[in-house]
Amino acid sequence: MLTRVRFGGLGGQGIVLAGSILGEAATLAGLNAAGSNSYGAAARGTACRSDVVLSDEPIDYPHLAAADVLAVMSQAALEKYLPIVTPNGIVFVDDFSVKAPADDGRSFHSVPATATAVREFGGRQSANIILLGVVLGAVDIIPLEAVRDAIRATVRERFHAANLRALELGVEFGRAARRF
Amino acid sequence: METLAELLPRAGGVFVQMEDEIASISAVIGASWTGAKAMTATSGPGFSLMMEALGYAVFTETPCVIVDVQRAGPCTGQATRVGGGDVMQCKWGMHGDVEIVALSPWSVQEMYDLSVRAFNIAERLRLPVFLMADEAVGHLHETAEFHERIAVEQRDRRKGLPPFGHPDPGGVPPMPCFGDGENLLVTGSTHDDRGYRKVEEPQVHARLVERLRQKVLLRRDELVDVERHMLDDAETVIVAYGFTARGALAAARELRGRGRKVGLLRLRTLWPFADKEVAALDGRARRVFVPEMNHGQVAGEVRKHFRGDVVGYGQTDGEVIPVATIVREVERIS
Protein backbone atom coordinates (compact mmCIF):
# COMPACT_ATOMS: atom_id res chain seq x y z
CA MET A 1 0.00 0.00 0.00
CA LEU A 2 1.17 3.50 -0.85
CA THR A 3 0.64 6.35 1.61
CA ARG A 4 1.62 9.90 0.74
CA VAL A 5 1.95 12.37 3.60
CA ARG A 6 2.67 16.09 3.42
CA PHE A 7 3.52 18.31 6.37
CA GLY A 8 3.29 22.04 5.68
CA GLY A 9 4.04 25.17 7.67
CA LEU A 10 6.72 27.74 8.25
CA GLY A 11 10.45 27.40 8.74
CA GLY A 12 11.23 26.91 12.43
CA GLN A 13 8.08 24.94 13.27
CA GLY A 14 9.80 21.58 12.93
CA ILE A 15 8.01 20.54 9.75
CA VAL A 16 11.12 18.94 8.25
CA LEU A 17 11.85 17.12 11.51
CA ALA A 18 8.32 15.68 11.62
CA GLY A 19 8.78 14.31 8.09
CA SER A 20 12.25 12.97 8.88
CA ILE A 21 11.00 11.10 11.94
CA LEU A 22 8.11 9.63 9.98
CA GLY A 23 10.46 8.45 7.22
CA GLU A 24 12.98 7.07 9.70
CA ALA A 25 10.21 5.24 11.55
CA ALA A 26 8.95 3.74 8.31
CA THR A 27 12.36 2.33 7.44
CA LEU A 28 12.74 0.96 10.99
CA ALA A 29 9.36 -0.72 10.53
CA GLY A 30 10.60 -2.38 7.35
CA LEU A 31 8.70 -0.18 4.91
CA ASN A 32 10.20 1.70 2.02
CA ALA A 33 10.22 5.45 2.50
CA ALA A 34 11.16 8.46 0.43
CA GLY A 35 11.17 11.98 1.77
CA SER A 36 11.70 15.41 0.26
CA ASN A 37 11.82 18.77 1.92
CA SER A 38 11.30 22.22 0.54
CA TYR A 39 12.16 25.36 2.47
CA GLY A 40 13.35 28.88 1.95
CA ALA A 41 16.88 30.19 2.40
CA ALA A 42 15.91 31.86 5.69
CA ALA A 43 16.11 29.74 8.83
CA ARG A 44 12.73 30.94 10.11
CA GLY A 45 9.41 32.05 8.78
CA THR A 46 9.35 31.12 5.10
CA ALA A 47 7.07 28.48 3.58
CA CYS A 48 8.20 24.98 4.31
CA ARG A 49 7.00 21.50 3.52
CA SER A 50 8.06 17.94 4.08
CA ASP A 51 6.77 15.09 1.94
CA VAL A 52 6.98 11.43 2.84
CA VAL A 53 6.02 8.55 0.57
CA LEU A 54 5.59 5.22 2.34
CA SER A 55 5.12 1.88 0.67
CA ASP A 56 5.60 -1.83 1.16
CA GLU A 57 6.77 -1.92 -2.49
CA PRO A 58 9.95 -0.25 -3.78
CA ILE A 59 9.29 3.44 -4.49
CA ASP A 60 10.12 4.31 -8.11
CA TYR A 61 9.15 7.96 -8.03
CA PRO A 62 9.83 9.59 -4.68
CA HIS A 63 7.87 12.84 -5.01
CA LEU A 64 4.14 13.13 -4.51
CA ALA A 65 1.67 14.71 -6.90
CA ALA A 66 -1.24 13.88 -4.57
CA ALA A 67 -1.44 13.53 -0.80
CA ASP A 68 -3.48 11.04 1.25
CA VAL A 69 -2.66 12.92 4.43
CA LEU A 70 -1.98 16.63 4.85
CA ALA A 71 -0.98 18.13 8.21
CA VAL A 72 -0.42 21.88 8.35
CA MET A 73 0.71 24.50 10.81
CA SER A 74 0.12 27.61 8.69
CA GLN A 75 -2.90 28.99 6.85
CA ALA A 76 -0.83 29.56 3.71
CA ALA A 77 0.25 25.91 3.67
CA LEU A 78 -3.36 24.77 3.95
CA GLU A 79 -4.48 26.94 1.08
CA LYS A 80 -1.52 26.00 -1.10
CA TYR A 81 -1.65 22.24 -0.56
CA LEU A 82 -5.35 21.52 -0.12
CA PRO A 83 -5.79 21.02 -3.91
CA ILE A 84 -3.46 18.00 -3.92
CA VAL A 85 -5.34 16.13 -1.18
CA THR A 86 -7.14 13.13 -2.67
CA PRO A 87 -10.99 12.88 -2.45
CA ASN A 88 -10.58 10.28 0.33
CA GLY A 89 -7.78 12.25 1.93
CA ILE A 90 -7.54 13.40 5.51
CA VAL A 91 -6.40 16.87 6.60
CA PHE A 92 -5.17 17.99 10.02
CA VAL A 93 -4.74 21.63 10.93
CA ASP A 94 -3.18 23.14 14.04
CA ASP A 95 -6.02 25.25 15.48
CA PHE A 96 -3.58 27.81 16.89
CA SER A 97 -2.69 29.18 13.48
CA VAL A 98 -5.01 27.59 10.94
CA LYS A 99 -8.75 27.75 10.36
CA ALA A 100 -10.11 24.44 9.10
CA PRO A 101 -11.96 24.73 5.80
CA ALA A 102 -15.62 23.96 5.31
CA ASP A 103 -16.37 20.28 4.79
CA ASP A 104 -16.11 19.21 1.16
CA GLY A 105 -16.26 15.44 1.48
CA ARG A 106 -12.68 15.13 2.57
CA SER A 107 -11.97 14.65 6.23
CA PHE A 108 -10.86 17.83 8.05
CA HIS A 109 -9.70 17.85 11.65
CA SER A 110 -8.71 20.80 13.75
CA VAL A 111 -6.33 19.81 16.55
CA PRO A 112 -4.80 21.85 19.38
CA ALA A 113 -1.15 20.97 18.63
CA THR A 114 0.46 24.28 19.55
CA ALA A 115 -1.97 24.97 22.40
CA THR A 116 -1.22 21.58 23.92
CA ALA A 117 2.53 22.09 23.51
CA VAL A 118 2.31 25.42 25.32
CA ARG A 119 0.14 23.98 28.08
CA GLU A 120 2.12 20.77 28.64
CA PHE A 121 5.66 21.88 27.89
CA GLY A 122 5.59 25.65 28.31
CA GLY A 123 6.54 26.34 24.70
CA ARG A 124 5.55 25.71 21.11
CA GLN A 125 8.53 23.52 20.23
CA SER A 126 6.77 20.17 20.56
CA ALA A 127 3.78 21.10 18.40
CA ASN A 128 5.30 19.36 15.38
CA ILE A 129 5.63 16.05 17.23
CA ILE A 130 2.09 16.38 18.57
CA LEU A 131 0.91 16.86 14.99
CA LEU A 132 2.96 13.84 13.88
CA GLY A 133 1.27 11.86 16.67
CA VAL A 134 -2.13 13.03 15.43
CA VAL A 135 -1.38 11.68 11.96
CA LEU A 136 -0.15 8.36 13.34
CA GLY A 137 -3.10 8.04 15.71
CA ALA A 138 -5.60 8.66 12.95
CA VAL A 139 -4.02 6.66 10.15
CA ASP A 140 -2.53 3.21 10.61
CA ILE A 141 0.75 3.59 8.82
CA ILE A 142 3.49 2.50 11.18
CA PRO A 143 3.69 0.76 14.59
CA LEU A 144 4.18 3.42 17.25
CA GLU A 145 7.20 1.63 18.68
CA ALA A 146 9.07 2.29 15.44
CA VAL A 147 8.17 5.97 15.75
CA ARG A 148 9.46 6.05 19.32
CA ASP A 149 12.70 4.45 18.14
CA ALA A 150 12.93 7.00 15.33
CA ILE A 151 12.52 9.84 17.83
CA ARG A 152 15.26 8.36 20.02
CA ALA A 153 17.51 8.06 16.95
CA THR A 154 16.80 11.54 15.60
CA VAL A 155 16.35 13.87 18.56
CA ARG A 156 18.95 14.79 21.18
CA GLU A 157 18.72 12.69 24.31
CA ARG A 158 17.71 15.50 26.65
CA PHE A 159 14.59 16.04 24.50
CA HIS A 160 13.57 12.37 24.32
CA ALA A 161 11.11 12.40 27.21
CA ALA A 162 9.30 15.55 26.05
CA ASN A 163 9.08 14.33 22.47
CA LEU A 164 7.83 10.88 23.43
CA ARG A 165 5.18 12.48 25.65
CA ALA A 166 4.24 14.89 22.82
CA LEU A 167 3.86 11.91 20.51
CA GLU A 168 1.47 10.18 22.94
CA LEU A 169 -0.65 13.32 23.33
CA GLY A 170 -0.86 13.65 19.56
CA VAL A 171 -1.79 10.00 19.11
CA GLU A 172 -4.71 10.48 21.54
CA PHE A 173 -6.03 13.40 19.47
CA GLY A 174 -5.55 11.33 16.33
CA ARG A 175 -7.48 8.36 17.72
CA ALA A 176 -10.32 10.69 18.68
CA ALA A 177 -10.35 12.09 15.15
CA ARG A 178 -10.67 8.57 13.84
CA ARG A 179 -14.05 8.08 15.45
CA PHE A 180 -15.65 10.80 13.35
CA MET B 1 28.45 18.79 4.64
CA GLU B 2 27.28 18.95 8.25
CA THR B 3 27.14 15.16 8.30
CA LEU B 4 30.60 14.89 6.76
CA ALA B 5 31.94 17.32 9.35
CA GLU B 6 30.78 14.89 12.01
CA LEU B 7 31.58 11.57 10.35
CA LEU B 8 34.85 12.18 8.47
CA PRO B 9 37.03 12.81 11.55
CA ARG B 10 35.63 9.66 13.16
CA ALA B 11 36.80 7.70 10.10
CA GLY B 12 40.29 9.19 10.21
CA GLY B 13 39.51 11.94 7.72
CA VAL B 14 39.76 15.70 7.95
CA PHE B 15 36.95 18.21 7.45
CA VAL B 16 37.87 21.86 6.94
CA GLN B 17 35.45 24.74 6.55
CA MET B 18 37.08 27.41 4.41
CA GLU B 19 36.07 31.04 4.03
CA ASP B 20 34.59 30.67 0.54
CA GLU B 21 34.40 28.40 -2.48
CA ILE B 22 37.63 29.65 -4.04
CA ALA B 23 39.48 28.70 -0.87
CA SER B 24 37.60 25.40 -0.62
CA ILE B 25 38.55 24.11 -4.05
CA SER B 26 42.10 25.37 -3.59
CA ALA B 27 42.36 23.50 -0.29
CA VAL B 28 41.00 20.40 -2.00
CA ILE B 29 43.72 20.63 -4.65
CA GLY B 30 46.39 21.08 -1.98
CA ALA B 31 45.02 18.16 0.03
CA SER B 32 45.07 15.97 -3.06
CA TRP B 33 48.78 16.72 -3.53
CA THR B 34 49.44 15.33 -0.07
CA GLY B 35 47.93 12.05 -1.26
CA ALA B 36 44.47 12.53 0.27
CA LYS B 37 41.26 11.72 -1.54
CA ALA B 38 39.72 15.18 -1.46
CA MET B 39 36.31 16.59 -2.30
CA THR B 40 34.11 19.61 -1.88
CA ALA B 41 30.46 20.37 -2.52
CA THR B 42 28.76 23.50 -3.69
CA SER B 43 25.80 24.99 -5.47
CA GLY B 44 24.89 28.04 -7.53
CA PRO B 45 27.44 30.88 -7.61
CA GLY B 46 29.82 28.79 -5.48
CA PHE B 47 30.34 26.59 -8.51
CA SER B 48 31.16 29.63 -10.63
CA LEU B 49 33.71 30.75 -8.05
CA MET B 50 35.49 27.41 -8.31
CA MET B 51 36.02 27.55 -12.05
CA GLU B 52 39.48 29.10 -12.15
CA ALA B 53 40.93 26.63 -9.68
CA LEU B 54 39.21 23.75 -11.45
CA GLY B 55 41.13 24.71 -14.58
CA TYR B 56 44.24 24.53 -12.40
CA ALA B 57 43.20 21.05 -11.23
CA VAL B 58 42.76 19.90 -14.82
CA PHE B 59 46.11 21.34 -15.93
CA THR B 60 48.08 20.09 -12.92
CA GLU B 61 46.32 16.70 -13.19
CA THR B 62 45.05 16.80 -9.62
CA PRO B 63 42.50 14.14 -8.68
CA CYS B 64 39.49 15.59 -6.85
CA VAL B 65 35.72 15.28 -6.66
CA ILE B 66 33.31 18.21 -6.83
CA VAL B 67 29.67 17.75 -5.96
CA ASP B 68 27.49 20.42 -7.55
CA VAL B 69 23.93 20.33 -6.24
CA GLN B 70 22.37 22.31 -9.05
CA ARG B 71 19.85 24.94 -8.13
CA ALA B 72 17.73 27.57 -9.86
CA GLY B 73 20.08 30.19 -11.32
CA PRO B 74 21.58 32.31 -12.67
CA CYS B 75 23.30 34.13 -9.82
CA THR B 76 21.89 33.61 -6.34
CA GLY B 77 18.58 32.80 -8.01
CA GLN B 78 16.31 30.78 -5.78
CA ALA B 79 18.89 29.39 -3.41
CA THR B 80 16.90 26.40 -2.17
CA ARG B 81 15.07 25.48 -5.39
CA VAL B 82 16.00 23.01 -8.06
CA GLY B 83 17.77 23.71 -11.34
CA GLY B 84 19.85 21.91 -13.94
CA GLY B 85 21.63 24.76 -15.63
CA ASP B 86 25.23 23.78 -14.84
CA VAL B 87 25.57 20.91 -17.33
CA MET B 88 27.55 22.99 -19.80
CA GLN B 89 29.33 24.93 -17.07
CA CYS B 90 31.06 21.87 -15.64
CA LYS B 91 32.40 21.11 -19.11
CA TRP B 92 33.07 24.59 -20.46
CA GLY B 93 33.16 26.85 -17.41
CA MET B 94 36.95 26.71 -17.32
CA HIS B 95 38.75 28.62 -20.03
CA GLY B 96 40.79 26.65 -22.51
CA ASP B 97 40.04 23.26 -24.00
CA VAL B 98 39.38 20.68 -21.36
CA GLU B 99 37.83 17.27 -21.00
CA ILE B 100 36.41 16.31 -17.63
CA VAL B 101 34.14 13.58 -16.33
CA ALA B 102 30.69 14.40 -14.97
CA LEU B 103 28.27 11.90 -13.44
CA SER B 104 24.54 12.36 -12.89
CA PRO B 105 22.90 10.65 -9.88
CA TRP B 106 19.12 10.24 -9.60
CA SER B 107 18.77 8.79 -6.11
CA VAL B 108 20.29 8.69 -2.64
CA GLN B 109 21.75 5.29 -3.53
CA GLU B 110 23.53 6.79 -6.51
CA MET B 111 24.79 9.79 -4.56
CA TYR B 112 26.71 7.14 -2.64
CA ASP B 113 27.61 4.76 -5.47
CA LEU B 114 28.60 7.48 -7.92
CA SER B 115 30.65 9.29 -5.27
CA VAL B 116 32.72 6.14 -4.99
CA ARG B 117 32.95 5.89 -8.77
CA ALA B 118 33.87 9.60 -9.05
CA PHE B 119 36.81 9.16 -6.66
CA ASN B 120 38.01 6.07 -8.49
CA ILE B 121 37.88 7.81 -11.88
CA ALA B 122 39.58 10.91 -10.45
CA GLU B 123 42.41 8.80 -9.04
CA ARG B 124 42.77 6.67 -12.16
CA LEU B 125 42.79 9.59 -14.61
CA ARG B 126 44.21 12.34 -12.38
CA LEU B 127 41.50 14.89 -13.01
CA PRO B 128 38.53 16.59 -11.35
CA VAL B 129 35.36 14.51 -11.54
CA PHE B 130 32.00 16.20 -11.11
CA LEU B 131 29.01 14.70 -9.38
CA MET B 132 26.29 16.81 -11.01
CA ALA B 133 23.42 16.35 -8.60
CA ASP B 134 20.43 18.64 -8.35
CA GLU B 135 18.46 20.00 -5.42
CA ALA B 136 15.74 17.37 -5.82
CA VAL B 137 18.29 14.59 -5.30
CA GLY B 138 20.15 16.68 -2.70
CA HIS B 139 17.03 17.04 -0.57
CA LEU B 140 15.91 13.47 -1.06
CA HIS B 141 15.77 11.01 1.81
CA GLU B 142 15.22 7.41 0.87
CA THR B 143 16.23 3.87 1.56
CA ALA B 144 19.75 3.10 0.39
CA GLU B 145 22.18 0.26 0.81
CA PHE B 146 25.71 0.94 2.02
CA HIS B 147 28.20 -1.71 1.07
CA GLU B 148 30.51 -3.50 3.50
CA ARG B 149 33.35 -3.23 1.03
CA ILE B 150 33.93 -0.91 -1.91
CA ALA B 151 36.45 -1.00 -4.73
CA VAL B 152 39.04 1.71 -4.08
CA GLU B 153 41.44 2.87 -6.77
CA GLN B 154 44.90 3.35 -5.27
CA ARG B 155 46.86 6.26 -6.66
CA ASP B 156 50.04 5.45 -8.57
CA ARG B 157 52.64 7.35 -6.48
CA ARG B 158 55.79 5.91 -8.03
CA LYS B 159 58.80 8.19 -7.80
CA GLY B 160 61.51 8.86 -10.36
CA LEU B 161 59.21 9.03 -13.38
CA PRO B 162 58.04 12.24 -15.07
CA PRO B 163 54.98 13.36 -13.02
CA PHE B 164 53.51 15.39 -15.90
CA GLY B 165 54.29 13.39 -19.00
CA HIS B 166 53.55 10.04 -20.56
CA PRO B 167 54.62 8.52 -23.86
CA ASP B 168 51.10 7.25 -24.66
CA PRO B 169 48.53 9.59 -26.24
CA GLY B 170 46.16 9.51 -23.27
CA GLY B 171 48.65 8.25 -20.75
CA VAL B 172 48.33 9.05 -17.05
CA PRO B 173 51.68 9.72 -15.34
CA PRO B 174 52.29 8.61 -11.76
CA MET B 175 51.69 11.25 -9.10
CA PRO B 176 54.19 11.32 -6.24
CA CYS B 177 52.89 13.57 -3.48
CA PHE B 178 54.27 16.34 -1.33
CA GLY B 179 56.18 14.63 1.43
CA ASP B 180 57.12 11.59 -0.64
CA GLY B 181 60.68 12.93 -1.01
CA GLU B 182 60.40 13.86 -4.67
CA ASN B 183 61.29 17.34 -5.97
CA LEU B 184 57.90 18.43 -7.24
CA LEU B 185 57.06 21.49 -9.25
CA VAL B 186 53.35 22.04 -9.73
CA THR B 187 52.31 24.91 -11.94
CA GLY B 188 49.25 26.12 -13.79
CA SER B 189 51.48 27.43 -16.56
CA THR B 190 52.32 25.17 -19.46
CA HIS B 191 54.95 22.73 -18.23
CA ASP B 192 57.09 19.90 -19.51
CA ASP B 193 57.09 16.30 -18.31
CA ARG B 194 59.00 17.27 -15.17
CA GLY B 195 56.83 20.26 -14.35
CA TYR B 196 59.17 23.00 -15.58
CA ARG B 197 57.41 26.03 -17.04
CA LYS B 198 57.54 26.09 -20.84
CA VAL B 199 55.39 29.04 -21.76
CA GLU B 200 56.91 29.79 -25.14
CA GLU B 201 57.10 26.41 -26.84
CA PRO B 202 54.05 25.69 -28.99
CA GLN B 203 54.66 21.94 -29.29
CA VAL B 204 54.92 21.48 -25.50
CA HIS B 205 51.57 23.21 -25.00
CA ALA B 206 49.87 21.35 -27.85
CA ARG B 207 51.16 17.97 -26.64
CA LEU B 208 50.11 18.59 -23.04
CA VAL B 209 46.61 19.84 -23.88
CA GLU B 210 46.08 16.95 -26.26
CA ARG B 211 47.19 14.30 -23.76
CA LEU B 212 44.88 15.77 -21.12
CA ARG B 213 41.97 15.60 -23.59
CA GLN B 214 42.81 12.08 -24.71
CA LYS B 215 42.97 10.83 -21.11
CA VAL B 216 39.19 11.15 -21.19
CA LEU B 217 38.33 10.67 -24.86
CA LEU B 218 40.28 7.42 -25.32
CA ARG B 219 38.47 5.97 -22.30
CA ARG B 220 34.98 7.10 -23.22
CA ASP B 221 33.66 3.54 -23.44
CA GLU B 222 34.51 2.80 -19.84
CA LEU B 223 33.37 6.24 -18.64
CA VAL B 224 30.03 6.57 -20.46
CA ASP B 225 27.33 4.90 -18.43
CA VAL B 226 23.73 4.80 -19.63
CA GLU B 227 20.64 2.93 -18.55
CA ARG B 228 18.20 1.69 -21.18
CA HIS B 229 14.53 1.25 -20.34
CA MET B 230 11.94 -0.13 -22.78
CA LEU B 231 13.99 0.90 -25.83
CA ASP B 232 13.57 -2.21 -28.01
CA ASP B 233 10.43 -1.09 -29.84
CA ALA B 234 10.32 2.54 -28.71
CA GLU B 235 9.14 5.05 -31.29
CA THR B 236 9.66 7.92 -28.89
CA VAL B 237 12.76 7.86 -26.72
CA ILE B 238 13.09 10.17 -23.75
CA VAL B 239 16.70 11.11 -23.07
CA ALA B 240 16.97 12.33 -19.49
CA TYR B 241 19.36 12.57 -16.54
CA GLY B 242 19.39 13.42 -12.87
CA PHE B 243 16.12 13.62 -10.97
CA THR B 244 14.23 14.43 -14.18
CA ALA B 245 15.04 10.92 -15.44
CA ARG B 246 13.13 9.48 -12.52
CA GLY B 247 10.04 11.41 -13.57
CA ALA B 248 10.73 10.38 -17.16
CA LEU B 249 10.77 6.69 -16.24
CA ALA B 250 7.48 7.03 -14.36
CA ALA B 251 6.06 8.89 -17.38
CA ALA B 252 7.34 6.27 -19.84
CA ARG B 253 5.66 3.51 -17.83
CA GLU B 254 2.42 5.45 -17.71
CA LEU B 255 2.59 6.09 -21.47
CA ARG B 256 3.27 2.37 -22.11
CA GLY B 257 0.09 1.70 -20.15
CA ARG B 258 -1.72 3.93 -22.62
CA GLY B 259 -0.31 1.98 -25.55
CA ARG B 260 2.42 4.45 -26.51
CA LYS B 261 5.76 2.97 -27.52
CA VAL B 262 7.97 5.07 -25.29
CA GLY B 263 11.38 4.27 -23.83
CA LEU B 264 14.03 6.00 -21.77
CA LEU B 265 17.74 6.41 -22.39
CA ARG B 266 19.07 7.61 -19.08
CA LEU B 267 22.44 9.33 -18.98
CA ARG B 268 24.31 8.44 -15.82
CA THR B 269 27.42 10.04 -17.31
CA LEU B 270 26.97 13.56 -18.70
CA TRP B 271 30.58 14.05 -19.80
CA PRO B 272 32.06 12.56 -21.88
CA PHE B 273 28.74 12.70 -23.71
CA ALA B 274 26.98 9.47 -24.70
CA ASP B 275 27.32 10.26 -28.40
CA LYS B 276 27.43 6.65 -29.66
CA GLU B 277 24.54 5.60 -27.44
CA VAL B 278 22.39 8.47 -28.73
CA ALA B 279 23.46 7.85 -32.33
CA ALA B 280 22.43 4.20 -31.91
CA LEU B 281 18.82 5.39 -31.58
CA ASP B 282 18.99 6.59 -35.20
CA GLY B 283 16.87 4.53 -37.57
CA ARG B 284 15.04 2.88 -34.65
CA ALA B 285 13.34 5.67 -32.74
CA ARG B 286 11.30 8.24 -34.66
CA ARG B 287 11.84 11.05 -32.23
CA VAL B 288 13.72 11.93 -29.09
CA PHE B 289 12.28 14.01 -26.27
CA VAL B 290 14.65 15.70 -23.84
CA PRO B 291 13.08 17.14 -20.67
CA GLU B 292 15.57 19.07 -18.55
CA MET B 293 15.72 21.79 -15.92
CA ASN B 294 17.50 24.20 -18.26
CA HIS B 295 16.80 25.42 -21.76
CA GLY B 296 18.25 22.66 -23.88
CA GLN B 297 21.80 22.06 -22.68
CA VAL B 298 21.62 18.31 -23.31
CA ALA B 299 18.99 18.56 -26.08
CA GLY B 300 21.61 20.44 -28.10
CA GLU B 301 24.12 17.61 -27.64
CA VAL B 302 21.48 15.05 -28.60
CA ARG B 303 20.79 17.00 -31.82
CA LYS B 304 24.43 16.61 -32.82
CA HIS B 305 24.12 12.83 -32.81
CA PHE B 306 20.47 11.93 -33.57
CA ARG B 307 19.33 12.86 -37.03
CA GLY B 308 15.57 12.51 -36.45
CA ASP B 309 13.33 14.93 -34.56
CA VAL B 310 14.69 16.10 -31.23
CA VAL B 311 12.18 17.96 -29.10
CA GLY B 312 13.48 19.69 -26.00
CA TYR B 313 11.39 20.69 -23.01
CA GLY B 314 13.01 23.15 -20.67
CA GLN B 315 11.58 24.13 -17.30
CA THR B 316 13.35 26.67 -15.13
CA ASP B 317 10.85 27.65 -12.44
CA GLY B 318 12.66 26.14 -9.48
CA GLU B 319 10.39 23.08 -9.45
CA VAL B 320 11.01 19.57 -10.77
CA ILE B 321 9.31 18.63 -14.03
CA PRO B 322 6.15 16.77 -12.97
CA VAL B 323 5.52 13.28 -14.35
CA ALA B 324 2.21 14.56 -15.73
CA THR B 325 4.02 17.25 -17.73
CA ILE B 326 6.33 14.70 -19.37
CA VAL B 327 3.33 12.48 -20.18
CA ARG B 328 1.47 15.44 -21.68
CA GLU B 329 4.41 16.66 -23.75
CA VAL B 330 5.24 13.20 -25.14
CA GLU B 331 1.59 12.69 -26.12
CA ARG B 332 1.58 16.10 -27.77
CA ILE B 333 4.56 15.33 -30.03
CA SER B 334 3.74 11.68 -30.75
Image: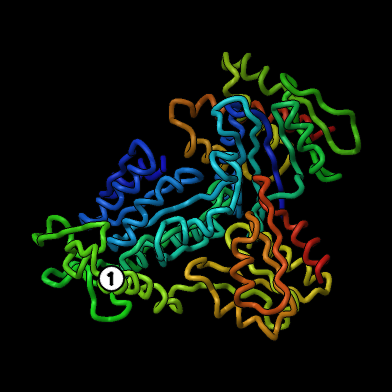
- Say whether residue B156 is visible: no
Residue A71 coordinates in the image, percent (x, y):
72, 34
Residue A74 coordinates in the image, percent (x, y):
71, 26
Kind of element beneath mark 1: helix
Residue sitting nearer the eye, B191 or B147:
B191
Identity of the residue furthest to the right in this view: A104
Which picture quadrant has residue A134? Answer: top right
Identity of the residue furthest to the bottom in this view: B283
Q: Amino acid at mark 1?
A: Pro
How many badges with numbers are in the image? 1
Q: From the viewer's perspective, is B107 left or right of B95?
A: right
Residue sitting nearer the eye, B314 or A14:
B314
Q: From the viewer's perspective, is A93 left or right of B264?
A: right
Residue B90 coordinates in the image, percent (x, y):
47, 58
- Say whether residue B111 is visible: yes
Q: From the viewer's perspective, is B322 left or right of A166?
A: right
**Residue beneath label 1, please?**
B202
Q: Residue at x 38, y 57 (%)?
A: B65
Residue sitting nearer the eye, A11 or B29:
B29
A95 to A153, vertically: above or below: above
Q: From the viewer's perspective, is B308 left or right of B32?
A: right
Which picture quadrant has residue A140? Answer: top right
If the image is split into quadrants, where does the N terminus of chain B sit? top left
Q: Residue at x 30, y 65 (%)?
A: B126
Residue B128 coordinates in the image, percent (x, y):
37, 60
Q: Residue at x 68, y 17 (%)?
A: A115
Residue sitting nearer the eye, A50 or B92:
B92
Q: Chain of mark 1?
A: B
B75 to A174, vertically: above or below: below
B261 to B81, vertically: above or below: below
If the image is split into quadrants, where does the C terminus of chain B sit? bottom right
Which picture quadrant has residue A164? Answer: top right
